[in-house]
Image (cartoon, rainbow, N blue to C red):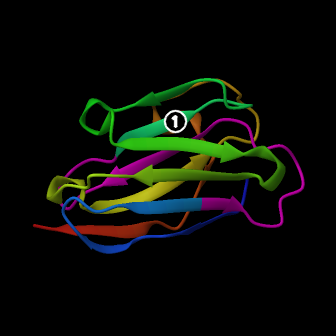
Amino acid sequence: QVPLVESGGGLVQAGNSLRLACAASGYTFTVYAMGWFRQAPGKEREVVAAIDWPGSRTLYTDSVKGRFTISRDNAKNTQYLQMNSLKPEDTAVYYCAASSSKSGLYRHSDSFDSWGQGTQVTVSS
């Protein structure tokens, strides 16, 4: 498994932006597929965005297309989620995910073997 450390969550007003980061702390091997999931109160965890290795393909859930951008810096084993035009419905705990062995593009949580601790994103109206 890959030790993942998230940063960048917080409280923002609707229409503003946040950037989440997820670093594979102290991990010297290649981190393959990566992704971001979120879970709002009373709802199931859902994929927000995912990126393959080395980063040529991405996917997004429909509700964030055109507003969020996933990217990665392979030299730093770090992925990012740039979130623009945030809406109150984006409020959730955001989790980063990674695979130590799979390099494809995945939207299901079962495809990832490593998870961050979660970071709260709250968007006020």
Of residues 33 and 13, the one drawn nearer to the viewer in this rendering: 13
Residue 114 screen position, x and y as percent: 63, 51
- Left or right of 102, for residue 47: left
Farthest residue, direction right? 28
Q: Residue at x 24, y 36 (%)?
A: 63
- Quadrant housing residue 71: top right
- SS category of the residue bearing label 1: strand
* Residue placed under numbered mark 1 in the picture: 50
Residue 9 image-quadrant placement: bottom left
Q: Is residue 28 magenta?
A: yes
Segment tinted magenta in the rendering: 22-45
Compared to 39, does 63 lie above or below? above
Residue located 76% across and 66% down the image:
25
Q: Is residue 98 above or below residue 101?
A: below
- Say few, some or many: other residues with alpha carbon within 10 Å of mark 1 (under 14 / 14 to 19 / 20 or more): many
Residues 62 and 30: in front is: 62
Residue shown at 18%/62% (left/top)?
A: 14
Q: Nearer the viewer, residue 70 or 95?
A: 70
Q: Is residue 93 above or below residue 67?
A: below
